[in-house]
Amino acid sequence: MKSTLNEIWEEIKVITDSIYTIFTTSLFSLGDTDISISTILYLILAFVILTFLASRSKRILTDKILAKVNMEVGARASIGTITKFSIIVIGTIVIMQSAGIDLSALTLVAGALGVGIGFGLQNITDNFISGIIILFEKPIKVGDRIEVGDIQGNVTSISFRATQVLTNDNISVIVPNSEFISSRVINWSHNDRNIRFRIPVGVSYNEDPEKVKKILMQVADDNPHILKNPPPNVLFDEYADSSINFSLAVWTTTHTDKPRILKSELYFEIFKRFREENVEIPFPQRDIHVKTQPLVVQSGDFSKTSE
């Protein structure tokens, strides 16, 4: 019985030694450091844990710590992203050193990576650097209403490669960060959420401009989404071909991301009030003048024959 146990133990030891040998056998060398399967598994596990801890730290910092000091959402998101990036960089250095990898041996790898960046990774590097510029200069922040190219929506997240923009149709658009640096960007809420919209209105030449102004001001005052301060205003824009045109200028904070809804609400109410007050809304008209010319008969010889 004892010999049987010894044999089993010897077999287990042989298997264990074989597994240990497989995991510790050098696959390749990085400088003076031998890289084995165990080293690779250690690096993978360590980076997974590091990424989890960095993301968790960012969430705790932005949602719990910074939220208590009444910091705006965009600033909290920027600080959280920078903190996450710093943790990953410092953690990577610690992991590499704890695995016995000499960082000076990575010079060759860094050189090869530089060549790769020069040829195939230009866009990734450009977006990465643009992301850092965005996070530090903050031309846009999470929660801002922006317009870049033909895309208009709210910024929901900013990473080091791209920015997510949520449109009014609930579509998330991933915009590369480089577009925010190299293209013209309209930020509707860079300073605050107070946005002014101009609503064009045309009436007939038969109407009294003062009466039209009074009606438009009443419509603006009755709308709960329009700010009282700054107050709304009515501007007399022009004498057009078929109408006299006004602009109802209003301020809002609640409809920054849905201006068409506010415009629709105002137009419905303006149309209703114009009908009640018998204000004529014109349609395009053209006056056509027909000039008649006298009939000219050329002289000539005319013969009349009779049967």
Image (spheres, grey):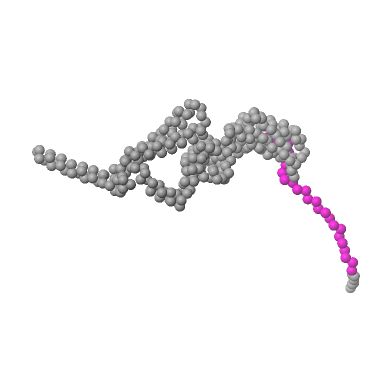
Q: Main secondary structure of the magenta part?
A: loop
Q: Is residue 292 left or right of residue 216?
A: right
Q: Please give the name of the residue rendered at 43% of the width and 31% of the height, measured from the top-left corner.
A: 60
In the picture, which quadrant includes the C terminus? bottom right
Residue 180 visible within the image: yes
Place of residue 223 in the rendered image (x, y in percent of width and height, measured from the top left): 63, 31
Residue 289 drawn in magenta:
yes
Q: How many dots with numbers? A: 0
State the residue at coordinates (67%, 32%): 232
Q: Position of residue 278 (x, y in %)?
A: 73, 35
**197 sits to left or right of 30:** right
User: Which span is picked out in magenta?
Assistant: 272-300
Q: Position of residue 285 (x, y in %)?
A: 74, 46
Position of residue 307 in the picture relative to residue 64 (left or right) = right
- The quadrant the N terminus occupies is top left
Give the left or right position of residue 18, taking residue 30 as reference: left
Q: Nearer the viewer, residue 185 or 236?
A: 185
The residue closer to the viewer here, 48 or 255, is: 48
> Going 90% across and 70% down the picture, which residue do you hit?
301
Residue shown at 63% from the left, 35% from the top: 196
Whether residue 287 appears in magenta in the rendering, the answer is yes
Estimate the x, y position of residue 195 in percent, counting from the top left: 61, 34
Residue 304 in sight in this render: no
Q: Nearer the viewer, residue 84 or 116?
A: 116
Q: Nearer the viewer, residue 40 or 292?
A: 40
**Which residue ends up furthest to the bottom in the rendered image?**
307
